[in-house]
Amino acid sequence: MPKENHDIFEELSKNENRNASISKINFDKEIRNYKELFNLFNKLVDQIADKSIRREIELQEKDVVIINISNRIIGTSKVYLDLVMKGYSYDSNIILRSLLENTCLMLYFIKDKENIEKWLSGELKLKRVRKELGLFTDKRFSKIYEYLSDYVHSNFVALKSLNEPEYDDGWVARMTIEPRYRPNLGKYALFPSVGSIALAAFIKNFERILDPKMILESIALCEKIEKEAAYLFKERTESK
């Protein structure tokens, strides 16, 4: 029987706090790497903004738009981190697609400044952005995007991920209300692959303005992440 005066939100909050505490311990390295990348990204954005305020540089329209998109990516990265640490794997995938889409927008703007006008018109759809970037023909991207879209649209394949193992019996399975700590999730979910792509794109656009030392620091960090990615996903493939 249901408990009297049962507060599901209070229960979820307790689970969130417990999961976050466990995640801090078990995913310490992953969390540090994730924060390091986005903290550096934020420093680069602030550097450009400060130079503009002091009138040391004059930003083009494209630059202003890219800075705004970068701020959106950095802000969303915090929401994503919180959701993963608290055990909301389903909702974190919804947010991850948003991160991916904003990164696609940045790449699109850098490709051609005229793309800014298409976007500012309010008529540009992301489907067109992906098409013009050639992402429809990129099998790896398409697979990832399709996977994340299942969560955005609540497709059955995504909803089934909420099944509680002890009740797993196909469609009759009992679906849990997250948060739920998943030991193997953080290792991969907190890998900042989308963030590293966005950071590299930002550096490419502002290379003429940024401090050379910070560019080298950023490149070194991206190379470090790429090496860890190769090892991490090789390990995952071999374990299957």
Image (cartoon, rainbow, N blue to C red):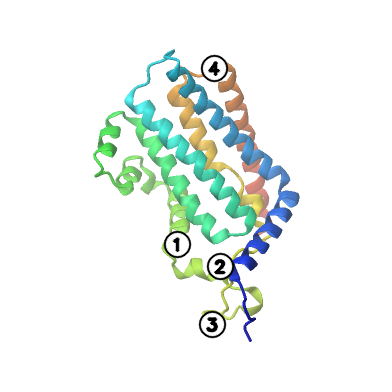
Q: CA distance from mark 1 to mark 3?
A: 20 Å
In-image side of 20 versus 129 (left or right): right
Q: Amino acid at mark 3?
A: Val
Q: Nearer the viewer, residue 230 or 201?
A: 201
Q: Earlier in the sequence, mark 1 or mark 2?
A: 1
Reading the image, the residue beneath label 2 is: 161
Give the distance between the C-alpha atoms of the residues marked 4 and 1, in whole angstroms.
Answer: 41 Å
Disc 3 marks which residue?
172
**Dot 1 crowding, Cα within 10 Å, few <14, some 14–19, many 20+:** some
Disc 2: CA contacts within 10 A as few (<14), some (14-19) or many (>=20): some
Kind of residue sitting beneath label 1: Asp
Residue holding disc 1: 150
The disc at residue 102 is none
Dot 1 or dot 3: first in sequence order is 1
Q: Kindly state the secondary structure of the residue where label 4 is placed.
A: loop
Residue 156 % position (x, y): 46, 70
Left or right: residue 28 versus residue 169 is: right
- Crowd tier of the residue under label 3, counting other residues whose Cα lies within 10 Å: few below 14, some 14–19, many 20 or above: few
Q: Are marks 4 and 3 in contact (CB under 8 Å)?
A: no
